[in-house]
Image (cartoon, grey):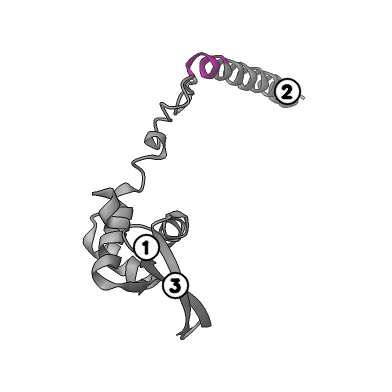
């Protein structure tokens, strides 16, 4: 009988402490929460993460255009291997695909079939630099 009363009291004290700690931590969080990239009122200033979208992929784009200008045309995996072997941090296939498809100076020439040991056959894109693209930017 005594142990039941003792356990019940400990349970109430535990719930109280748990609620107290939770409320205290919420108050602390409300006071000190800041956004990672504060929103700025000037739309031309960009965010702190991507420098306004201007410099995020510039070196990657330049490297790809120079490689395609020297080589003529290359498929996506060849470009990926070149970028990852020559740049310190390289790139991911997803980022490379986005850069290749959205850059107006890089043209998709054709697709070729590739055969993988595990994945079967799949298509891969062949890319080329738009004629005169590098002369305009210099």
Judged left or right of residue 131, residue 26 is right
Q: Residues within 10 Å of mark 1 (few under 14, many from 20)?
A: some
Residue that mark 3 sits on = 109
The reply to whether residue 33 is visible in this rendering is yes
The reply to whether residue 89 is visible in this rendering is no
The answer to whether the residues at label 2 and label 3 have Cβ atoms under 8 Å apart is: no
**Which mark is on residue 130?**
1
| Whole-number angstrom distance, CA of label 2 to CA of label 3 | 76 Å
Q: Which residues are magenta?
A: 27-32
Residue at the far right in the pictured view: 1
Seen at 49% across and 19% down, the residue is 41
- Principal secondary structure, stretch drawn in magenta: helix
Looking at the image, residue 131 lies above or below residue 121: above
| Whole-number angstrom distance, CA of label 1 to CA of label 3 | 10 Å
**Which mark is on residue 56?**
none
Looking at the image, residue 77 lies above or below residue 9: below
Quarter-of-image position of residue 90? bottom left
Under circle 2, the secondary element is helix
Judged left or right of residue 17, residue 55 is left
Q: Residues within 10 Å of mark 2 (few under 14, many from 20)?
A: few
Quadrant housing the N terminus: top right
Residue 103 position in % (x across, y down): 42, 54
Residue 70 position in % (x across, y down): 23, 69
């Amino acid at each position: 009988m005594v142990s039941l009363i003792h356990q019940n009291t400990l349970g109430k004290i535990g719930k109280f402490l748990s609620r107290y700690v939770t409320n205290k931590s919420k108050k602390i969080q409300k006071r000190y929460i800041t956004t990672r990239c504060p929103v700025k009122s000037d739309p031309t200033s960009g965010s702190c993460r991507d420098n306004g979208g201007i410099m995020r992929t510039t070196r990657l784009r330049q490297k790809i255009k120079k490689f395609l200008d020297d080589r003529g045309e290359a498929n996506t995996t060849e470009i990926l291997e070149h970028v990852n072997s020559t740049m310190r941090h390289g790139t991911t296939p997803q980022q490379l695909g986005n850069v290749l498809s959205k850059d107006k100076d890089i043209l998709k020439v054709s697709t070729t079939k590739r055969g993988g040991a595990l994945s079967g056959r799949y298509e891969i894109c062949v890319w080329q630099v738009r004629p005169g693209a590098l002369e305009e930017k210099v």
